[in-house]
Image (cartoon, rainbow, N blue to C red):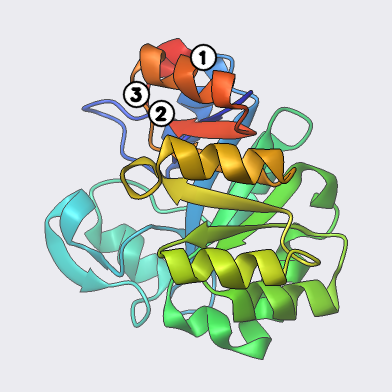
Amino acid sequence: MEIWAHRGFTTEAVAENTLESIKHALSEGASHITCDVRECGSGELVLMHDPTLWRTDHKFIPISSTTLNELNEKCSYEIVTIQNVLELCAERASLLINLKGESFLKTSLEKKVIKEIEGYKSNVTVSSNSITTLAKIYSKCPNIKTTLNITSGEFIKKAIGNILFINSLYFDRKNISNRKLKNMVRKNIDVYVGVISSPLEAEELAVIGVKGIYTNNKNLI
């Protein structure tokens, strides 16, 4: 079972989705790392889960309308681009890039994502909660691996019907039962579950046969 370091590994001094959190994960032996990506006001694809800096830095600064330079002037930690992370993880770890924000429905941005990961495709998976986004990425570059983030039961039905361009499914643990997981595993669907911290729960999921888990617990590596 694959163990994915969720947004790198954080500490009180190390924020999520930063070069420091990813370096920390690598130093702990992680060979699979997830991160979240948004487009900032100056067009770069930056590591950030939320639409503002409020949760991570207690500042209500919108990512989509603020330039990278301005973000780094105002944020207490360094905000980096996906290119920085791709270079860091190259040949060292597989990277899952989770696309965030409505702007990822724009064709121009999909081209930008594909261009950014050119040369790293064998080690990169792109994930989204939008089937449309993943379909558009697949149509432009079918060699890119994709993961659909499932948010409802209806989504599961749609995902199964579009398995041609969706390589795997991701579920939040609280939204999926063991019975449903077993059913999907029996259908040879690659399933990922997160965010798992308990070794016992990780062992239970391994027995079920899920492809991998996302975790914040470095002791599960």
| Numbered circle sitting on residue 128 | none
Indicate whether 182 appears above or below 13: below
Using the rendered image of the protein, determine whether residue 187 is visible from the camera's viewpoint: yes
Residue pointed to by mark 1: 28
Number of residues whose C-alpha sits closer than 10 Å to that of mark 1, classed few (under 14), some (14–19) or many (20 or more): some
Indicate whether 6 appears above or below 97: above
For the residue labelled by badge 2, is the local secondary structure a helix, a strand or a loop?
Answer: loop
Residue at figure coordinates x 31%, y 44% from the top left: 174
Residue pointed to by mark 3: 197
The CA distance from mark 3 to mark 1 is 16 Å
Number of residues whose C-alpha sits closer than 10 Å to that of mark 3, classed few (under 14), some (14–19) or many (20 or more): some
Q: x and y percent of residue 117 in the render?
A: 75, 58
The CA distance from mark 2 to mark 3 is 12 Å
Residue at figure coordinates x 42%, y 17% from the top left: 218
Q: x and y percent of residue 10 in the render?
A: 34, 30
Name the N-terminal-most of marks 3 and 1.
1
For the residue labelled by badge 3, is the local secondary structure a helix, a strand or a loop?
Answer: loop
Q: Are marks 1 and 2 in contact (CB under 8 Å)?
A: yes
What's under tag 3, amino acid-wise? Ser
Residue at figure coordinates x 37%, y 48% from the top left: 78
Indicate whether 170 appears above or below 195: below
What's under tag 1, amino acid-wise? Glu
Name the N-terminal-most of marks 2 and 3.
2
Residue pointed to by mark 2: 9
What's under tag 2, amino acid-wise? Phe
Closest to the observer: 208 or 119? 208
For the residue labelled by badge 1, is the local secondary structure a helix, a strand or a loop?
Answer: loop
Would residue 91 appear left or right of 204 to someone viewing this image? right
Residue at figure coordinates x 52%, y 15% from the top left: 221
Would residue 91 appear left or right of 46 to someone viewing this image? right
Would residue 186 appear left or right of 220 to someone viewing this image? right
